[in-house]
Image (tube, rainbow, N blue to C red):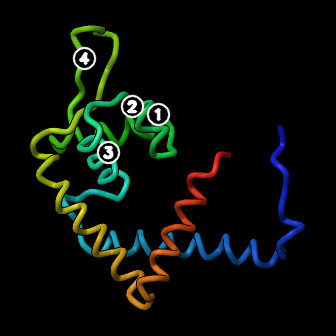
Amino acid sequence: MVAESRVGEWDRKEMIALDEAFRQLRKLIAAEWDKESIGGLNVTQARILIILAESGPLKASVLAETLFVTSGAVTGLADQLIEMDLIRRERPESDRRVVLLDITPAGHQLVEAIHAKRIGIMERLVKELEEPEVLELTRLISKIVSTPR
């Protein structure tokens, strides 16, 4: 089933401008993240630690879906995090065929610093906005990401 296009309702230039605004925002967030390292983690590795800290052990495939990346990408990222002793692979006794990824105590120690860094980045990005604008921006982005595709 092909989704009904609403492009006719909006000016194509506006859609291109919106796409560019999202691309620029992603670049800004990445640049802000790269300014100061937390344990040498990139943003996706940090996100894995947060997800595992909040949800507990997960299969790589579940992490991949959550992060919108391939299972192969999660395997590579997991290998790096395991080498850093921030996560570990586990096999539950109930089914030894299943492999779960879980955060280690060292990984847990970084989570609060990661949260603080994320908040700092967002504060810098929205510093010129008024509180109602930040709330509206949050509402609109949440609506975009929660809309079924």
Label 2 sits on residue: 60
Answer above or below: position of 110 versus 63. below
Left or right, 91 with respect to 7, comes to left
Q: Position of residue 6 (x, y in %)?
A: 83, 61
Q: Amino acid at mark 3?
A: Ile
Spatial CA span between label 2 and label 3: 12 Å
User: Quadrant of residue 17 in the image?
Assistant: bottom right
Of badges 4 and 1, nearer the viewer stands 4
Spatial CA span between label 1 and label 2: 6 Å
Which numbered disc, 4 or 1, marks the residue that appears first in the sequence?
1
Label 1 sits on residue: 71
SS at badge 1: helix
Residue drawn where x is 67% and y is 74% of the image = 18
In the rendered image, the residue lying farthest to the front is 132
Spatial CA span between label 3 and label 1: 15 Å
- Specify the label residue 51 is tagged with: 3
Which numbered disc, 2 or 3, marks the residue that appears first in the sequence?
3
Q: Position of residue 124 (x, y in %)?
A: 35, 82
Which numbered disc, 4 or 3, marks the residue that appears first in the sequence?
3
- Specify the label residue 87 is tagged with: none
Left or right, 25 with respect to 81, comes to right
Q: Looking at the image, which is closer to me, 136 or 73?
A: 136
Which numbered disc, 1 or 2, marks the residue that appears first in the sequence?
2
Q: Amino acid at mark 2?
A: Ala
User: Quadrant of residue 85 in the image?
Assistant: top left
- Specify the label residue 91 is tagged with: 4
In the rendered image, the residue lying farthest to the right is 8
SS at badge 2: helix
Q: Dot 4, how many residues are within 10 Å of its Cα: few (below 14), some (14-19), or many (20+)?
A: few
SS at badge 4: loop
Q: Dot 2, how many residues are within 10 Å of its Cα: few (below 14), some (14-19), or many (20+)?
A: many
